[in-house]
Image (cartoon, rainbow, N blue to C red):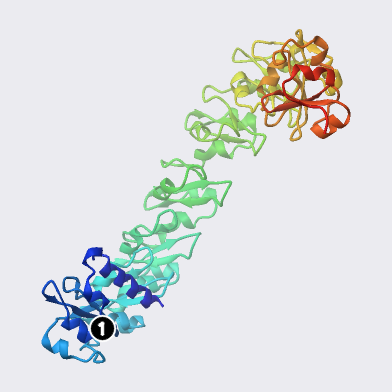
Amino acid sequence: MGRLAVFLALLCLVFSTVKADDMLDCRHISEQDACHQTTVNGKHCSWCYFKTNPRSTWCTNPDESVNNEWIACEEPTLEATLAKPEAEPEVHADVAKCFGIKDADTCRNNTENGVQCLWCQSKAVKSNCVNPDQAKRLPPAVFVCDAPAKIEVEVAKCFDIKDADTCRNNTENGAQCLWCQSKAVKSNCVNPDQAKRLPPAVFVCDAPAKVETEVTKCFGITDADTCRSSTENGAQCSWCQSKAVKSNCVNPEQAKRLPPAVFVCDAPAKLEVEVAKCFDIKDADTCRNNTENGAQCLWCQSKAVKSNCVNPDQAKRLPPAVFVCDAPAKVETEVTKCFDITDADTCHNSTENGAQCWWCRSNAVKSTCVNPDQAKRLPPPLFVCDDPKVESNPVDKCFSINDVNTCRNSTESGAQCVWCQSKAVPSHCVNPDQAKRLPPAVFVCDATSESMPEMPEHAAVNYCSHSLDAVECVSTGCSWCEVGENQNACVKRSDSKFYSICKSHN
């Protein structure tokens, strides 16, 4: 099946060079005699066949005839014209000898037209025996071919080795075999040229030098202390930590190729265990009182995942939506004072670096005390934060109300409290400014005086019910009205005149 696919591909390649307006009489002829007796522009048509399958024949225009390792076209001579179609052309078995060989040893001990056959191995598809020209056209990502020289069975010795120790103690054509390790696919023993073509994201290969078992010493170490106390070719081993996959001990060159979003590696210098000191610290106080290479350790807090102690460079790579890190300066415990506060009153009466702490309330998750910069990054659908200019809590009167009726009958700083209903998260009572910041896709808020033209005072608070759907609203004798863009509310029928679109009956 594979050979048939190759034949069809070559046939398409041969025909792809032919223009549509050149496809004249020759291509329509199916008999050899008729082919040779036909002329196009004064030239005889050519009768062609596959060398590996002489009975697969066709007639082609004289300008399209080719002769290569796959196809032969007969010259339109008188002898050829008189030949019988059944007669097979004089094809020497040696012409396609390489491609017809099925095993590696026979392939490497044969030649084609005086050139050594090459065995091309593959773990994805069937291995093949080909000549050097054919080998050049095989994709190196799929096939590992013998070198086109004086080849003996020894040529593919590296690739045939199955274990790391035997691989590192052998050579191929005078070059050290290299062991390429992988945790995604099967590890392989290859020669230096083959190793260069393997993707570094998948394989970690021995260095192509005077290779001993010691070459991959770093990669074989499984604990951090031993890793940091070891060297490879005179270079300090690096311990690359990860919370997503298994941590690894690698040499400096390998460490450079690991993705920084997944691994936190030791700095490629004269490394001691102290190098990763920040990352090893487990509590905030110890973290903030330590340094790493002269830089203050930073405590990065998170309520979604485990908090971490990192150095300033590592802190820059952590996502701000998940971690709240100490400022990379002269850091003391006071730096995260706001975040450490757990009650609203203390938060409102505290500052951080001269800025007022904000108390950010939430009915979905735990309320938090943060500094102004941190408050700006909190999502408004979950948190309602103090205004940064306010140092006390009277402005949060609406937000402290938990029932709809009390909310609609209360005011805050002279403004009517607004009840914002939601089926996704708990409903909230907020002031008009806070209501504007809630996403309409999540909350359906009462209409404020700003959105109701000339509405009497009682209309803003006296809703028919707190129904969340039109069916319930209308069934109780109320009107379901559009009170804003993509916002609906249930109101008294007497108040429906204030809205342009209402539904009062089924």
Q: Position of residue 459 (x, y in %)?
A: 81, 15
Q: Which residue is mark 1?
A: 110
User: Would you place residue 300 above or below residue 76 in this image?
Assistant: above
Residue 313 seen in this snapshot: yes
Q: Amino acid at mark 1?
A: Asn
Question: In the shown orientation, is residue 189 left or right of residue 332?
Answer: left
Q: Residue at x 68, y 14 (%)?
A: 350
The quadrant in which residue 279 appears is: top right
User: Would you place residue 278 above or below residue 419 in this image?
Assistant: below
Q: Quadrant of the C terminus?
A: top right
Q: Residue at x 66, y 27 (%)?
A: 439
Q: Position of residue 355 (x, y in %)?
A: 61, 13
Q: Position of residue 256 (x, y in %)?
A: 41, 46
Q: Residue at x 12, y 84 (%)?
A: 77
Q: Position of residue 398 (x, y in %)?
A: 78, 17
The quadrant in which residue 195 appears is: bottom left
Q: Tell me the element at label 1.
A: loop
The quadrant in which residue 45 appears is: bottom left
User: Would you place residue 65 above or below residue 427 in this image?
Assistant: below
Question: In the shown orientation, is residue 56 left or right of residue 115?
Answer: right
In the foreground, 321 or 481: 481
Q: Quadrant of the N terminus?
A: bottom left
